[in-house]
Image (spheres, grey):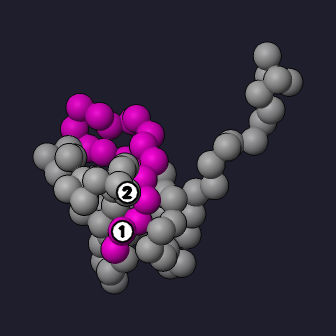
Amino acid sequence: MKEMMGDACPMEFNFDASSFRVGDLVSYRVTGSLTGMPFAGTLMEVHDDYVVLTSNPEDPTSRMRATRESRPIVQEDDIC
């Protein structure tokens, strides 16, 4: 089965917080009951000390503030 699927991840994430740009795909984490689960999102805004990301770029109400680090952290209460 491994040979069929290959070893490469089908997504390319940006893990370099210093080079974050709007539109980058990032892997982010969530606090609370979702700790330890990986999530993927698109950066909508990039600021000096935080980012705004979404798991659905087509939904303008789906925006979450997160820390600006290699794998941003979203507070569980901020999930939309």
Residue drawn at 14 percent across, 46 percent down: 77
- From this view, report whether residue 46 is shown above or below residue 76: below
* Residue 47 screen position, x and y as percent: 32, 80
SS at badge 2 = loop
Residue drawn at 36 percent across, 68 percent down: 44
Residue holding disc 2: 57
Mark 1: few/some/many CA within 10 Å (<14, 14-19, 20+): some
Q: Please name whichever residue, 67 or 55, is drawn nearer the observer in this view of the structure.
A: 55
Q: Please name whichever residue, 26 or 63, is drawn nearer the observer in this view of the structure.
A: 63
Q: As drawn, is 33 to the left or to the right of 46?
A: left
Mark 2: few/some/many CA within 10 Å (<14, 14-19, 20+): some
Q: As drawn, is 25 to the left or to the right of 37?
A: right
Residue drawn at 68 percent across, 42 percent down: 9
Amino acid tagged 1: Met
- From this view, report whether residue 40 is shown above or below residue 68: above
Q: Are marks 1 and 2 in contact (CB under 8 Å)?
A: yes
Residue holding disc 1: 44
Magenta region, residue range: 28-45
Q: Is residue 52 magenta?
A: no
- Residue 11 shows in the view: yes
- From this view, report whether residue 3 is shown above or below residue 11: above
Residue drawn at 62 percent across, 48 percent down: 11
Q: Is residue 41 magenta?
A: yes
